Image (cartoon, helix red, strand yellow):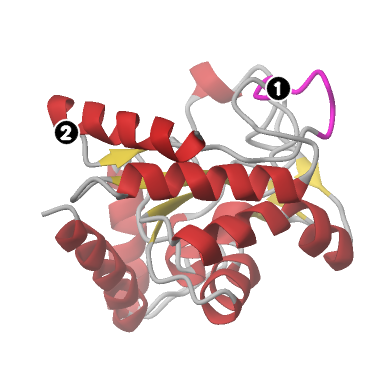
Amino acid sequence: MVTEIGKMIGSEMERFGVDLWLAPALNIHRNPLCGRNFEYYSEDPLVAGRIAAAMVRGVESCKGKGTTIKHFAVNNQEDNRYFVNAHLSERALREIYLKGFEIAVKEAAPMSIMTSYNLINGIHAANQYDLLQTVLRDEWGYEGMVMTDWFTSQFIPQLQSKFEPIYPISSSTGCVKAGNDVQMPGCAKNVTDLIESVTEAKQVDGIAVTKADLQFCAANVIRTVLKTV
């Protein structure tokens, strides 16, 4: 049934000229008051993963149409989600919070993945090399594109100043170094930070990137674009 719903969504995407659907979302119902529970599937990672995989298969059965599973990972609350720092063990991360994503990736190979705003054990999800490269690509064999959630690596007071941030926003150089291929929606500072780091071989926000790092991300974007043709 979920696969059939996915096919309907893919058909709508064709009519509206949309290539990537920014869904499905499959974070865990950790708290009944989480502001995104209406969008997430379950408190059980197996249920969440299997439903998401079925949805992805349905949408991507339509030629050139792709999904963006999100929010990768450990998005447990809506308030202050730019700066909340989730502390958890590797076992809890793998057995609960990542398991649904792992199932969706291995069973359905979604075209893209969106990272979450929050930090995980002190590092923004968008800047997590161990999450995006070691686990997602090396262990799970993911070959698609990774994008940030909106304004992850730029400070927007209207969105983020409700809370006094303890941590900085995620960095542009950190996104590229971790294999976060696209920063949405992007700003001039994101560009200049990357150019400065590459051309001057220097750290920006404590992280240095190389031309090869940029080429890796660009290649992932190009491969994804070609799948939408």
Measured from the top left, where is residue 177 in percent x and y?
A: 47, 71
Above-or-below relation of 172 to 212: above
Residue at x 87%, y 55% (from the top left corner): 88
Q: Label 1 to label 2, Cα distance in Å?
A: 34 Å
Using the rendered image of the protein, determine whether residue 225 is visible from the camera's viewpoint: yes
SS type, badge 2? helix
Residue on which disc 1 sits = 79
Q: Quadrant of residue 195?
A: bottom left
In this image, 55 relative to 43: left or right?
A: left
Question: Is residue 34 on the magenta stretch?
Answer: yes
Above-or-below relation of 42 to 176: above
Q: Mark 1 near mark 2, Cβ–Cβ under 8 Å?
A: no
Measured from the top left, where is residue 36 in percent x and y?
A: 65, 24
Residue on which disc 2 sits = 14
What is the span of residues highlighted in magenta in the rendered image?
Answer: 30-37
What number is the disc on residue 50?
none
Q: Quadrant of residue 202?
A: bottom left
Q: Nearer the viewer, residue 168 or 109?
A: 109
Q: Amino acid at mark 1?
A: Asp
Q: Nearer the viewer, residue 16 or 122?
A: 16
